[in-house]
Image (tube, rainbow, N blue to C red):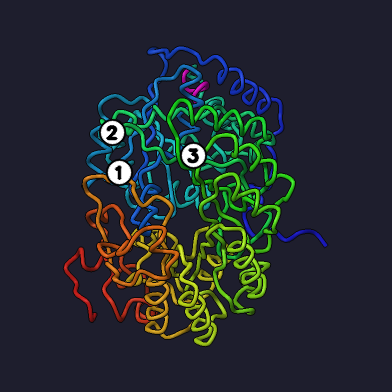
Amino acid sequence: MPRQLSLSPVLYTDANEIVDERYMRQMREQDESPVATNPSLPRFTLVVGPSPFTMPRGWEFFLTSPYEGATYISTVLHNAGYPVRIVDVRYTPNPLQAAYDQIMEGTDVLGVCTFEDNFPFCAELMQRVRESAPDIPIICGGSLVTSVPHVFMEHTPCDIAVISEGEITILELMESYAAGRWSRDLPNTRGIWYRGPAGAPKATRPRGQMPDLDSLPRMRLELWPQARDPRGLQPQIISSYSRGCKMDCSFCYRTTPQVRAKSPEKMDRDLAWLKSRYGIEFCFFVDLTFTSYRKQTLAMCDVIKDHDLRWTCLTRCADTDAPRLDAMRDSGCDIILYGVESLGSEVLREARKGNSENITVRAMRRTFDAGVRFGSLLIVGLPNETEESLGHMVEFAETYNHVTRVKYLSAMPGTTVYRQAIDQGLMRSELDHINWLSIEQALHEDEFLNVSGLPEQACRDAYQRVYDAYQPGPVMDFRHFPEHFEYFHPQPFDGMERSTSYAGQGWRAQWSSAAASLVPGSDRFTLDRVADPAVASVGSATMACGAKRLGGVQAGV
């Protein structure tokens, strides 16, 4: 029986044609010998917009760190000689105005990074740029535009949507634009949506994933504005050695679902570069499943061990054993984040997790025995959740105080859960839904789509108790706080002794989570404004979320 793919089939293809090989070879060569910046080439500005997502105490570095997607896009263009700028407004009080002002300072081609929770910002920024500078072409890339390119092409002035990976595609697009060949080349440029002569959106053949991640250049973090901060770049970095995931969870969207990995030699070179050039001390490896393959994991740990780094990663409970855990500990791993999600057998089956409570408990004990911290990632409100199974998850969290993150289920565009929510009429429209995703802060007062059918108050009470069972993150002395962070929910309970021995007494007495401020105008996208009343009444009736409070609505709505 053929494999049933949950994501768009265009994502399960390979970038293995002659043109792909040419650009992968170019990336390798220009990594070794970058082309001098040529001021006569088009000036490329890449905008990284805000996210409302909070991070727990000790994980705040994640909100401000340079990350791979934008870094690789800007690096391959920089190495090819293009004048490149990253405009990062993730924690700016008025991000729309700040991004617009910097774009207008000198941009020939605009790139916009899209995430599941920043659509209103992207749409409004593109509209303002188009009205002021109609000749600037606008290219969107990232997870959200990959999942719903039709929404961008219908509801924004986006000219080109890049699907899945962007390194090869952006080089091909910019080379064509610089030569004045877009009208001729776009129909044959794989992996994009573009506008035809009459403005109608058209999709080209898929490009797919690069088979060889060793083609990627070393990341040039100096392209980020943080590099010009008086404090310098923060010593925490977000990186990876692989792309893709062998699993197919119903709630998870992957722009690169097929598993690809760098060689140990490439990984060694990349870490040596980051360490020597930028003074990196800590790395969050954002591989979706760091320990999927034992031999590969052991090889990567051998590489990391030589670079004197502390680090963390994401993985599955089913993919751990003593050899892997010992190697991770010996190479500096601080905490391992496990996608536990739930303990309910029917919940895990419906979510296609390939997990069970026994597997989770075994992984937790093995991790503790290895001397590494175990970090649970939990979801409240998955399909098939019952009050009994939810209560069991809460007891699990409170017993061990090992939680790193809890959030309500999000219907991420492109996922099975998303399609089911559409079929059930939980979304009034796709546009309304992705606007609403922009107000999710990962706090217990968030609004949520109640797909489990549980009482709203039961979900909120469970969330609050799990949130109160957080453990410290790995970087408690983070010193690069932006000026305009907001802080949430101080908590006097310190958890177990292992928390205070790690982070000190009262480690979250001032706050449990932190984030940038919500974007002004976020109150336009609450459920009572974008969803049917029946949907809002079971997921936003008992508390006022941050966006409602921003608009002056108090609790008790």
* Residue contact at pointers 2 and 3, CB within 8 angstroms: no
Q: Nearer the viewer, mark 3 or mark 1?
A: 1
Q: Position of residue 215 (x, y in %)?
A: 63, 28
The residue labelled by disc 3 is 69
Q: What whole-number distance in Å separates the C-alpha atoms at marks 3 and 1? A: 24 Å
Q: Are marks 3 and 1 in contact (CB under 8 Å)?
A: no
Determine if residue 49 is in view.
Answer: yes
What residue type is disc 3 on? Gly
Q: Amino acid at mark 1?
A: Arg
- Can you say whether 165 is above or below 6 in the image? above
* Mark 3 or 1, nearer chain start: 3
Q: Which mark is residue 231?
A: 2
Report which quarter residue 221 is drawn in.
Answer: top left
- Span highlighted in magenta in the image: 173-178
In terms of secondary structure, where does tag 1 sit? Answer: loop
Q: Which residue was labeled with disc 1?
A: 479
- Contact? badges 1 and 2 (CB < 8 Å): yes
Amino acid type, label 2: Arg
Q: Is residue 313 above or below residue 34?
A: below
